[in-house]
Image (cartoon, coloured by chain):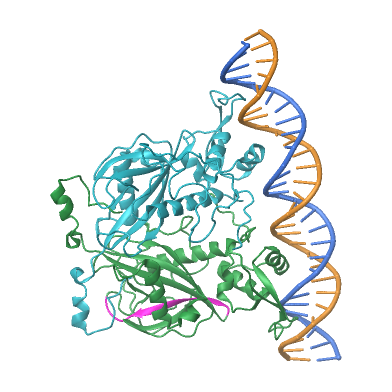
Chain colours: A cyan, B green, C blue, D orange
Amino acid sequence: MSRQPARPDDEAAFLAAYDPRDFPAIALTVDIVVLTMREGRLNVLLVERAGPPFQGCWALPGGFVKAGQEGLDEAAARELAEETGLSAGALRRVHLEQLGSYGAPGRDPRMPVVSVAYLAFAPDLPDPRAGGDAARAQWTPVVGLHGGGTGDRHATDRHSADPHSTDPRSTDPRSTDRPATDRELAFDHAQILADALDRARAKLEYTPLATAFLAPEFTVPELRAVYEEIWGEKLHPGNFHRKVLSVPGFVESTGETAERGGSRGGPRARLYRAGDARLLHPALLRPDREEGVR
Amino acid sequence: MSRQPARPDDEAAFLAAYDPRDFPAIALTVDIVVLTMREGRLNVLLVERAGPPFQGCWALPGGFVKAGQEGLDEAAARELAEETGLSAGALRRVHLEQLGSYGAPGRDPRMPVVSVAYLAFAPDLPDPRAGGDAARAQWTPVVGLHGGGTGDRHATDRHSADPHSTDPRSTDPRSTDRPATDRELAFDHAQILADALDRARAKLEYTPLATAFLAPEFTVPELRAVYEEIWGEKLHPGNFHRKVLSVPGFVESTGETAERGGSRGGPRARLYRAGDARLLHPALLRPDREEGVR
DNA sequence: TGAGAAATACTCGATCTGAGAACAACAGGT
DNA sequence: ACCTGTTGTTCTCAGATCGAGTATTTCTCA
């Protein structure tokens, strides 16, 4: 960054190069993959595009960065607030981090557009409001979405889901008039979503961020459900319980217990709060992933 | 991304918004943190700025993205090739990955500039050539550099131009004559470098990328030296050796042994090649890092 | 030729992990 | 109320892994 177009011309040309208008036009946007847990399923916030291109298609919420007026993180936070209609207070409980930037030529048919993608983990949020240029916005189960699912090959780098994972996906991806499920996403958003899921799966391993999907007070089984849903595989209840309580700073007891036992029986679970750890040590690793080689 | 500025105006305004000239001017660059190992020390490629702003300051190599003509990864690869003067063949042995994007307002005094930072791991490369707008370019030991050093706090979460980044502007880090060591970096490059080092340290844990710093054939002690230099701490030779050989796909034996023993004595070490693993399983974790909390 | 250093192999005890069992608490239906 | 099946939580046990320390052998250097 921070260099004139190229070539150490003379001073005049040098300064002239600073005229913004002389740069090839390029637009910068932020897109956000907002993940939340609804009724035990991982959902992503999608908006239906009101105009071309990809009119009628579902896409990730996002918008243009106000060049010079806001930073990237700020722009993402602003878009997140606008799109979810959440108060600043509620937003404080949402985890937001940069995912990566996408700028393949032609990804937007209108003009060169580079998008900085963000990833957000949110507790169960109210239904979104269709604001701005979106025809409507809604939570969509990730399962069955292109780019969704448990195993999305591609992953730039680390971890890719294993081929032999138990795939609880429903074998009924019908999309008659159902909302966004099983729809192609606009632009390269399927790729962004896939990368986001890979990142989310990895994050659960070494951070306590799974708690960001839950209410301030939660039980170990609820926490386990988050891991199972995002990783797409069942975990050993006993071992998971032992692990969570043994990692320093992961959770702290409230002394209370849940109001009711499980919906299908069982004793009432104890309640915990998120601890003060930012990183899990030792990490909570995903079961047997033989990959690595390839 | 991919939405008009905001607000569901009427169709006319909608279409008008597509004129590139109507968007606030913003420039997009790529900056690359190229790391290599020279004489046992971790070095980063820096260029001396030939013109303002930050004239005479050292900065990360980089340049403007050719909007619409190349993707982000392409642009980074191109800049890397230009700046190092390496052949396409030699570049194939270099690991290049996206680090994150930085777009704090005012990070470039000229105009809004967002930079997509990349991270590269390279084996010992020849001296760089000062091309383009750079007065000169050279490898600089990371130690002693602002943003360098072993302990750069900040970071549990990589990337993102956070608001509280050290802002090197305002001060006048004029160049006297000394190379780059102990100099303030231009723009927010100290922050980018710090983030890059954090990422590099983490990458060594779960990927075999340490081998990217070495020749095609290397010994276990040489590999250990890479880890020790980047992590900034001595490792137990015996345990490291056992671990490296036990992780499937990390290294594979060539059957040969090094020409000479260690410079200060000791038997000749066996030679290995990088294996076919992309991920280390189980990971090679850094010794005792009590952090996690706070 | 001797001393010191380093590569590699081994040992031992502390930890961590996966799998399974045990037991009590609880929901739902009879 | 009383079964019956489910589930939260705790334990046990064997195998894998890890940190630390030791032993052995092979080099370099003086």
**Residue A155, percent from left and from top:** 49, 58
Residue sitting at the far left: B12
Picture quadrant of residue A290: bottom right
**Residue A283, percent from left and from top:** 59, 50
Main secondary-structure element of the magenta-colored stretch: strand
Left or right of residue A42: residue B227? right
**Residue A53, percent from left and from top:** 26, 53
Left or right of residue B85: residue A241? right
Residue B143 visible here: no
Picture quadrant of residue B282: bottom right
Specify start and end residues of the magenta stretch as a single range: B40-52
**Residue A113, percent from left and from top:** 29, 60
Residue at image position (41%, 77%) is B46
The one nearer the camera, B120 or C12, is: B120
The one nearer the camera, B98 or B143, is: B98
Residue B231 covered by magenta stretch: no
Residue at image position (37%, 62%) is B101
